[in-house]
Amino acid sequence: MDAGSVAFLREVLAETGWIERTRELGLALRATRSAGGLLLVGTPDDEPWHLTAHLGDEARLSGLPQLAPTLVRWTPPAGAPAHLSVGLDRILQAGRGETLFVVAERETPVPLLERVDDARRTGATILALEGAGPELAGSELAGLAHDTIAVPAAGPVSFDGAQHLVSAAAGELTPRPRLRERLAVLLERLSGPRVNE
């Protein structure tokens, strides 16, 4: 999804509350204190590669090095490059000033929940983006996270779309006004202020 598609999605969702929620989570991601201190982890079958790439782009484009994520993998292959060989043990080292961002469209496995609990106890901030459905109601992950967004399968935004909204929001230096507000400002600049007759 390119920047134009994200902007269009934001316009479509403007009145739903999704933009505000994703901005809150994006701002929470920015609270990470150091480059590499933002840890992204998914499930064994679905690692958040795409979101990792987008947050890396946002870190570079916005000049916010704390958004440069570390992808935490369940079973990194032997001989993988350093940035692709970070295993679950990294979560055990997480502490104050670091953020563990769990991205799980389906149920979070118990071994990950245990590591999330450990990271929370050592002072890491826990954030989550998870799927929502009858089987996930009252999820354990939501109970461990400082902030979470649950994305319903039949909601106005897909799980992939929610990831794009969060990453774009994380890189925003200032919240952008909605398109209608920007057009009104532009029109006023071009034609002068409206005069009531």
Image (tube, rainbow, N blue to C red):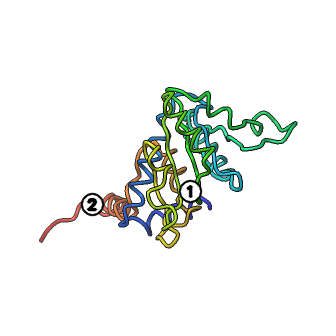
Q: Residue at point 82% right, 36% down?
A: 81
For label 1, the residue is 164
Residue 62: name its quadrant. Answer: top right
Amino acid type for the residue under numbered disc 2: Gly
Question: Which structural element holds mark 1?
Answer: helix
Distance from the alpha carbon under mark 1 to that under mark 2:
37 Å
Q: Quadrant of the C terminus?
A: bottom left
Q: Name which of mark 1 and mark 2 comes first in the sequence.
A: 1
In the image, farthest residue toward the right:
79
Picture coordinates of residue 167, whole percent (x, y) = 55, 50
Q: Residue at x 54, y 27 (%)?
A: 95
Q: Residues within 10 Å of mark 1 (few under 14, many from 20)?
A: many
Describe the element under mark 2 as helix, strand or loop: loop
Residue underneath mark 2: 192
The residue that appears at 65% across and 51% down in the rendered structure is 43
- Circles 1, 2 touching at the beta carbon (< 8 Å): no
Task: Classify the position of the N terminus by image quarter.
Answer: bottom right
Q: Could you say which is closer to the camera, residue 23 or residue 87?
A: 87
Q: Where is residue 153 shown, x and y percent of the image? A: 52, 69
